[in-house]
């Protein structure tokens, strides 16, 4: 005689023998995964710029508040393996800008903003601990003061003098050959237009960009309309022109990128994604493969607006670089770090964090 429980078990057993819930493999492709490495650096009040040493596994980082140059050897994911730290001149010299030399491959130009000097160094990449060597030293001519950005263009260096609001052109092979251009407060970066060869500098305390014609010495100001935004900071040469970011002010970002065409007209591209639209855009760099990817990387920063998110943003354009097709916003793991500079390498994206003494590496994997 079967009791109730036995009947139930019997029924379940019969059911499982005849179960027809089908299970089958389905496609399992995924979009790429995002990976972040937060490299802690020696503590400094302000960590500023980062540059790679071409054809090596080294990156250099400037810590301005104590004038320390960090030499970091990184793996292919941007994780620091070895690190050396070197005070440049003295603790108040204010090491700031870093730039590649083409004339002296592997050498790096740097600025000592308070010591008012431009210095070419051999970073010495046999080991992270080897002390870099000075190759050439150039005093900024008076009345120039406070070099921030330096860039090498053939025999010449172009330099923003942040503290005297001027731009310096100086020959590094004949330092008596120089010109100082008066700017509005305060020139930050300089870039040379790929089509008209003029030099442009963004003045972050003026809603204006200065154009310099190096052959005539004539300077002109290109005003930034208030509805586009304000505070031009990051400025680089790129496809079909000069590209720059507008940071905004203490209370709001702009989410706006500018593109200066050969005739000085400017197209403003506004981000539209929820985290992009008000991004406080400080710096930018083109994808190394931008001819194919049409991608531009941006850094949004809490540097002047503590409510702004610190993010890395990848935008991709159409083939004519006229319209933004896609925006991908990645929040940096440490917020309120005043994200400062972005550097693209073949395998990863670096970002410096000004106040948290970190070098962030971001990379994607497709597994
Ligand atoms: C650093 O060097 C400058 C000269 O370039 C000097 O005026 C200054 O006093 C020095 N500062 C320190 C802390 O040694
Ligand atoms: C260096 O530049 C100065 C100023 O332009 C010029 O007078 C001088 O002839 C130049 N020297 C050489 C060796 O070219």
Image (tube, rainbow, N blue to C red):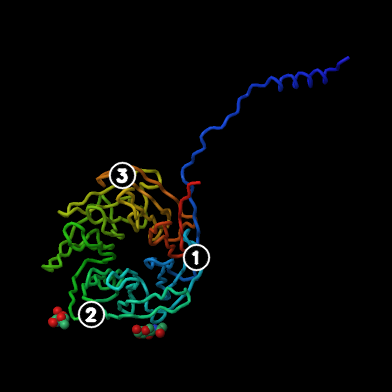
Observer-side mark, 3 or 2, equals 3
The residue carrying mark 3 is: 324
Residue under the point 39% across and 75% down? 123
The residue carrying mark 1 is: 80
User: Can you say whether 2 is above or below 61 in the image?
Assistant: above
In which image quadrant can residue 17 be found?
top right
Which disc is residue 342 wearing?
none
Spatial CA span between label 3 and label 1:
34 Å
Ligand 1 lies under 8 Å from the Cβ of mark 1: no
Spatial CA span between label 3 and label 2:
43 Å
Compared across the picture, whether 86 is left or right of 108 comes to right
On the image, the x and y values in percent for residue 350 come to 42, 60
On the image, the x and y values in percent for residue 99 come to 32, 69
Compared across the picture, whether 281 is left or right of 321 comes to right
Observer-side mark, 2 or 1, equals 1
Please tell me how crowded label 3 is: few (under 14), some (14-19), or many (20+) other residues with Cα within 10 Å: some
The residue carrying mark 2 is: 141
Residue under the point 26% across and 50% down? 228
User: Can you say whether 155 is above or below 1 in the image?
Assistant: below
């Amino acid at each position: 005689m079967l009791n109730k429980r036995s009947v139930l078990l019997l029924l379940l057993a019969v059911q499982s023998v005849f179960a027809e819930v089908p299970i089958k493999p389905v496609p399992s492709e995924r979009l790429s995964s995002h990976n972040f490495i937060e490299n802690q650096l020696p503590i400094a009040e302000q960590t500023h710029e980062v540059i790679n040493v071409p054809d090596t596994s080294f990156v250099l980082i400037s810590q301005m508040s104590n004038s320390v140059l960090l030499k970091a050897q990184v793996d292919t994911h941007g994780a620091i393996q070895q690190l050396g730290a070197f005070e440049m001149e003295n603790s108040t010299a204010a090491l700031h800008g870093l730039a590649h030399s083409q004339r002296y491959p592997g050498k790096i130009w740097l600025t000592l903003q308070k010591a008012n000097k431009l210095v070419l160094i051999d970073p010495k990449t046999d080991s992270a601990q080897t002390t870099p060597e000075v190759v050439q030293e150039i005093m900024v001519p008076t009345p120039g003061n406070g070099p921030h950005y330096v860039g090498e263009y053939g025999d010449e260096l172009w330099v923003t003098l942040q503290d005297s609001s001027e731009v310096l052109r100086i020959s590094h092979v004949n330092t008596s050959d120089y010109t100082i251009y008066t700017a509005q407060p305060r020139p930050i970066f300089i870039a040379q237009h790929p089509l008209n060869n003029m030099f442009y500098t963004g003045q972050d305390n003026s809603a204006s960009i200065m154009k310099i014609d190096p052959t005539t010495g004539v300077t002109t100001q290109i005003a930034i309309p208030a509805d586009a935004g304000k505070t031009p900071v990051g400025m680089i040469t790129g496809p079909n022109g000069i590209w720059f970011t507008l940071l905004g002010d203490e209370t709001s970002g702009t989410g706006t990128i500018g593109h200066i065409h050969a005739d000085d007209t400017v197209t403003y591209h506004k981000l539209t994604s929820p985290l992009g639209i008000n991004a406080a855009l400080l710096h930018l760099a083109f994808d190394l493969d931008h001819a194919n990817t049409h991608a531009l990387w941006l850094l949004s920063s809490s540097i002047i607006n503590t409510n702004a998110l610190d993010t890395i943003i990848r935008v991709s354009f159409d083939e004519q670089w006229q319209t933004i097709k896609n925006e991908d916003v990645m929040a940096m793991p440490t917020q309120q770090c005043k994200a400062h500079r972005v550097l693209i390498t073949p395998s990863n994206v670096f970002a410096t964090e000004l106040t948290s003494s970190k070098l962030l590496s971001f990379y994607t994997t497709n597994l």
